[in-house]
Image: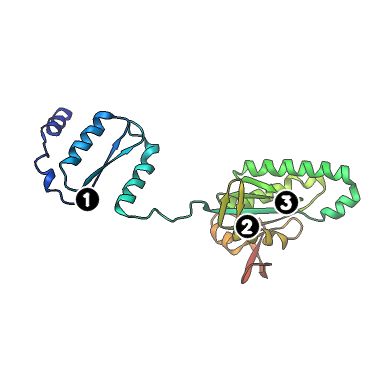
């Protein structure tokens, strides 16, 4: 079969029909191969409206495909996709230590710094264990993102258990929505919603938005209604739910 395909390839001569091709024609060729460039230019010379563009490299590489595709788009007058590739869907988790100022007053600066350091170490460890991305510290808590909301909720529960022997309680909020990636930073309205949800949680509470509750159906997590709330700076009223198991 290979021999027959090669015979057909080399026996086929289209030079006689090339002058009949009246359409605008683009020939892309690797600029690093002199023989290929000469062949492309010879073919183009026999066509009324053909042009040759030399491309980088001397062999086909997958990494080069976007460059070749862009040349074809430009030739056809097609605009490139306008999808914002810096926006992704993510579950955002915010945690906060309840009564941190009072604990600081009770324990003193040095002792509180030690407690906070151990809290941060354990919390970051749980985020890693549940496949999340630690974005940054919020002072007395953290901000992390996850590919799925169920893992974010479970991680919040795990963090609360991990720091319980330090004599501190945390509150957590989870929301799922599109976020904007800016280097190591994560931004967007979904981030603000997650922070506002966490601020409404009580000691040891994990509050979630309606979106999270709907998305984790079948995960085994159970919730109780926490009512509708206004989230500061966010339009509309938001129905929240408290994780109970």
Classed neighbour count for the residue bearing mark 3: other residues with Cα under 10 Å, few (<14), some (14–19), many (≥20): few
Q: Position of residue 6 (x, y in %)?
A: 16, 30
Residue that label 1 marks? 24
* Above or below 147: residue 224: below
In the rendered view, tell whether residue 101 sits above or below residue 183.
Answer: below
Residue 221 % position (x, y): 61, 55
Q: Count residues near mark 1 (Cα–Cα under 10 Å), then give few for <14, some for 14-19, many for 20+.
A: few
For label 2, the residue is: 191
Q: CA distance from mark 2 to mark 3?
A: 13 Å
Q: SS for tag 1? A: loop
Q: Provide residue 18's location: percent of width, then percent of height.
A: 13, 43
Residue at 88% x, 45% y: name it. 109
Marks 1, 3: nearer the viewer: 1
Count every numbered label the image shows and give the total: 3
Quarter of the image that includes the N terminus: top left
Residue with the mark numbered 3: 138
* Residue under the image location 18 percent in, 36 percent down: 42
Secondary structure, mark 2, is: helix
Horizontal placement of 240 versus 177: left or right?
right
- State the residue at coordinates (73%, 40%): 121
Q: Nearer the viewer, residue 45 or 121?
A: 45
Q: CA distance from mark 2 to mark 1?
A: 49 Å
Q: In which quadrant of the rendered image does the C terminus lie?
A: bottom right
Across and down, in percent, residue 145 comes to 61, 50
Location of residue 26 (image quadrant): top left
């Amino acid at each position: 079969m290979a021999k027959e395909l090669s015979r057909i390839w080399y026996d086929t001569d289209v030079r006689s029909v090339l002058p009949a091709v009246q359409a605008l024609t683009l020939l892309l060729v690797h600029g690093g191969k002199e023989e290929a460039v000469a062949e492309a230019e010879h073919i183009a010379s026999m066509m009324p409206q053909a042009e040759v563009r030399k491309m980088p490299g001397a062999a086909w590489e997958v990494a080069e495909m976007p460059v070749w595709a862009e040349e074809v788009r430009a030739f056809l007058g097609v605009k490139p996709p306008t999808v914002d590739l810096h926006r992704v869907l993510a579950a955002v988790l915010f945690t906060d230590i309840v009564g941190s100022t009072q604990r600081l007053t009770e324990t003193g600066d040095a002792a509180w710094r030690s407690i906070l350091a151990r809290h941060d170490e354990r919390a970051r460890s749980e985020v890693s264990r549940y496949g999340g991305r630690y974005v940054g510290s919020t002072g007395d808590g953290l901000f992390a993102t996850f590919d799925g909301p169920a893992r974010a909720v479970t991680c919040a529960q795990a963090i609360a258990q991990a720091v319980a022997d330090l004599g501190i309680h945390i509150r957590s909020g989870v929301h799922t929505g599109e976020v904007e990636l800016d280097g190591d930073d994560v931004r967007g309205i979904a981030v603000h919603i997650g922070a506002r949800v966490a601020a409404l949680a009580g000691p040891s509470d994990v509050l979630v938005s309606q979106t999270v509750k709907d998305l984790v159906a079948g995960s085994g997590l159970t919730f109780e209604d926490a009512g509708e709330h206004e989230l500061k700076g966010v339009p509309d009223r938001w129905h929240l739910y408290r994780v109970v198991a």
